[in-house]
Image (tube, rainbow, N blue to C red):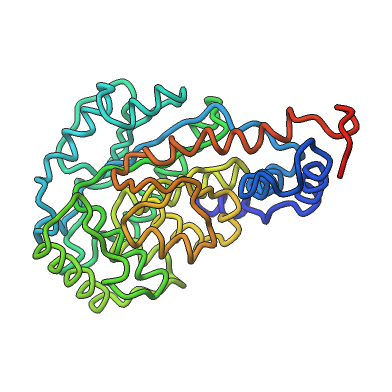
Amino acid sequence: MLDTALAAIRPLDDDAMAQARALHARLTKPAGSLGVLEELSVRLAGLAGACPPPLPEPGAVAIFAADHGVHRQRVTGWPQEVTAQMVANFLAGGAVVNAFARQVGASVTVVDVGVATALEPADGLVQARVRPGTADLASGPAMTVDEARAAIDVGLRVAADLHAAGARVLLTGDMGIANTTAAAALVAGFTGADAAEVTGRGTGVDDETYRHKVAVVAAALRRHRPDPVDPIGVLAAIGGLEHAALSGFILGAAARRIPVIVDGVSAVAASLAAASLAPAATGAMVAGHRSVEPGATVGLRHLGLQPLVDLGLRLGEGTGALLAWPIVASAVRVLHEVATFDAAGVSEK
């Protein structure tokens, strides 16, 4: 599946982008008055190869859930069983992501790609567990290369299924206690940044735990010496199963030429892996928000993506992506519905 997706990912269409810029110049507004939204709509025209591009709706959130062996390094105060408990909360509709999804009319799919606790079948749950959590990245590879590839394939399949079901924009979600440690290691591995520059407090650890977390990430980087030229090897060595699956999910959106709204630091880490596999995939990525996790800012800068929302969020789940989705839709709707100066009988400058 990965090879097929990579072959389908192409650069943005220059002609469609030129048409979108020309259309913006004729709409009843001062040139450039919509700021970032104008360039976003131009980029989405290039992604679709059409002007105006299709409206990015309906939307579908996929929450990839997995556990992490690095949890045993005490990098978080939360017990590992919270991952499975939160999956149950998602499926019951009781989490923040569910409230935000109901607000904007998005579907929510939960994907067990590596939860340590066995989960019962349930509506809205995709059971695609590659293994019950990763190994401890601080003491060895988090998973094998074959397992990383299998997790990528899970993300590709979920993207394909949601698109086939009618979704025209995909939104990334994640759940996994200790996953910000793996995300920090991935961001450092793909960007060359220092561990202290990319490691944040995750679920809100105290100063002592934070210093230990930075040391764990730094030690993992020294042990594994990640090479961005081998992105699957990087994911296998220091990533999480949800990070690998998110990479596949993002590549799946790019292969289908539909936008994917990237959530927090785990999704940014996955985006870096996806971009290493297919640089043109960045054309499909929309940075939903700027997480307070420092690795998110480092990763977005490396990708050349500007976040749409900056509200001090650090929850994950897909919450920031959901808040950004109406902004993305509004950017495209301008090209569909706003009158030109000629059509409206409005004098130009």
Q: Position of residue 146 (x, y in %)?
A: 34, 57
Specify whether residue 1 is in view. Answer: no
Look at 32% across and 48% down and name the residue there: 242
Look at 53% across and 32% down and name the residue there: 326
Left or right: residue 245 compared with residue 170: left
The residue closer to the viewer here, 191 or 250, is: 191
Q: Position of residue 68 (x, y in %)?
A: 19, 53
> In the picture shown, does residue 194 fall above or below 241?
below
Using the rendered view, name the quadrant where residue 317 is placed: top left
> In the picture shown, does residue 323 fall above or below 344?
below
Left or right: residue 72 compared with residue 196: left
> In the picture shown, does residue 324 fall above or below 103?
below
Look at 20% across and 34% down and name the residue there: 86
Q: How many numbered marks does the figure carry?
A: 0
Q: Position of residue 106 (x, y in %)?
A: 45, 26
Look at 77% across and 44% down and name the residue there: 20
Specify whether residue 306 is in view. Answer: yes
